């Protein structure tokens, strides 16, 4: 009796990832204009707040033209209005605006601008342009969203800053209007949808607690720096917990004579055995 065994191996090619749905230029422009106009109008509140803090017209407009980071600008003039040290106020604004550098690292790969264009594009790397850009499915839409959002927001923010600074005198006591809360309110409205998982919520909650605890104890502007420690603290705790969990969940070595369980990747190779018996 002769026995013949044929082993055939068939490898299934992995399915390509689904292509992101196409997005029309009009939809990208509509979203970008919506964000740019909504946030750009809040420059009026900054102009009024800055003038109420004692900054001149040229100083206020220079901050919007050259700094162009709304939350940092509000933090700076808010600290100065509360009587804080200018260096402390500037340090708090600097560290608050440093987040844009991390946005830039991500947007550099998404937008793919040439080296000579990047210095000009970097001035528009802020929360709003980053949010619109990263929401696009392809590079062309990302560039369009970044450009429209940045241009709309930059022009409106500076125009409304000028109007607010000029009209601050007509409003009288700017503190009575509570316009200094407009900037943080806009920033929180943009940030809230991004806080989705437990780690982000814990970090945000810890930052709020640190600010509330240190606000009566430390000079103006310093609580913002202290609140920045919330993120690394939460990430450190999370890293330790993941390492401990990974140690506990180490798979046990199978006993002798027991077949090891097949990994999901092993299903990519299919073995088919065909046996034909020929009798002499």
Image: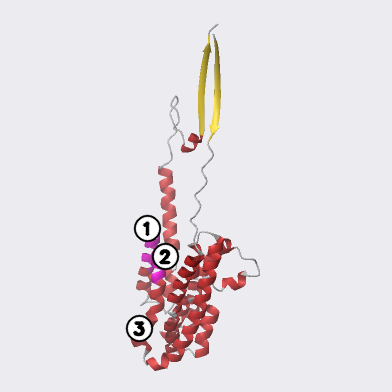
Query: Left or right: where does residue 226 sit relative to residue 111?
Result: left
Q: Residue furthest left?
A: 176
Q: How is the image coloured?
A: secondary structure
Q: Main secondary structure of the magenta part?
A: helix
Query: Left or right: where does residue 89 sit relative to residue 185?
Result: right
What distance separates the C-alpha of mark 2 from that of mark 1?
Answer: 14 Å
Residue 211 % position (x, y)? 38, 72
Q: Up-down: is 121 above or below 264?
A: below
The residue pinned by badge 3 equals 178
The one nearer the camera, 155 or 127, is 155
What distance separates the C-alpha of mark 1 from that of mark 3?
Answer: 32 Å
Q: Residue at x 42, y 86 (%)?
A: 48
The quadrant holding residue 174 is bottom left
Which type of secondary structure does the marked residue at label 2 adopt? helix
Position of the C terminus by quadrant: top right
The residue pinned by badge 1 equals 198
Which type of secondary structure does the marked residue at label 3 adopt? loop
Camera-side mark, 2 or 1: 1
Q: Up-down: is 107 above or below 164?
A: above
The residue pinned by badge 2 equals 230
The one nearer the camera, 175 or 159, is 159
Q: Earlier in the sequence, mark 1 or mark 3?
A: 3
**CB-based contact (under 8 Å), mark 2 and mark 1:** no
Camera-side mark, 1 or 3: 3
Q: Residue at x 57, y 64 (%)?
A: 111
């Amino acid at each position: 009796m002769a026995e013949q065994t044929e082993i055939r191996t068939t490898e299934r090619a992995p399915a390509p990832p689904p292509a992101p749905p196409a997005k029309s230029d009009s939809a990208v422009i509509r979203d970008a204009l919506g964000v740019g106009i909504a946030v750009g109008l809040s420059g009026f509140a900054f102009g009024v707040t800055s003038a109420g803090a004692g900054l001149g017209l040229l100083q206020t407009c220079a901050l919007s033209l050259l700094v162009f980071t709304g939350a940092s600008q509000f933090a700076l003039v808010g600290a100065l209005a509360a009587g804080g040290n200018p260096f402390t106020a500037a340090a708090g604004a600097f560290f608050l605006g440093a987040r844009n550098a991390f946005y830039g690292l991500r947007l550099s790969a998404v937008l793919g601008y040439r080296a000579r264009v990047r210095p000009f594009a970097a001035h528009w790397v802020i929360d709003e342009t980053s949010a619109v850009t990263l929401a696009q499915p392809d590079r062309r839409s990302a560039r369009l969203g970044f450009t429209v959002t940045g241009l709309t927001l930059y022009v409106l923010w500076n125009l409304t800053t000028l109007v607010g600074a000029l009209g601050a005198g007509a409003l009288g006591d700017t503190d009575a209007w509570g316009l200094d809360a407009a900037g943080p309110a806009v920033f929180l409205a943009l940030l809230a949808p991004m806080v989705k998982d437990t780690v982000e919520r814990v970090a945000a909650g810890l930052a709020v607690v640190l600010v509330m605890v240190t606000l009566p104890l430390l000079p103006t502007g310093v609580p913002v720096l202290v609140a920045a420690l919330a993120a690394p603290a939460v990430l450190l705790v999370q890293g330790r917990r993941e390492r401990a969990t990974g140690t506990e969940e180490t798979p046990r070595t199978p006993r002798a004579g027991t077949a090891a369980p097949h990994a999901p990747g092993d299903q990519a190779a299919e073995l088919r055995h065909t046996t034909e018996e020929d009798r002499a």
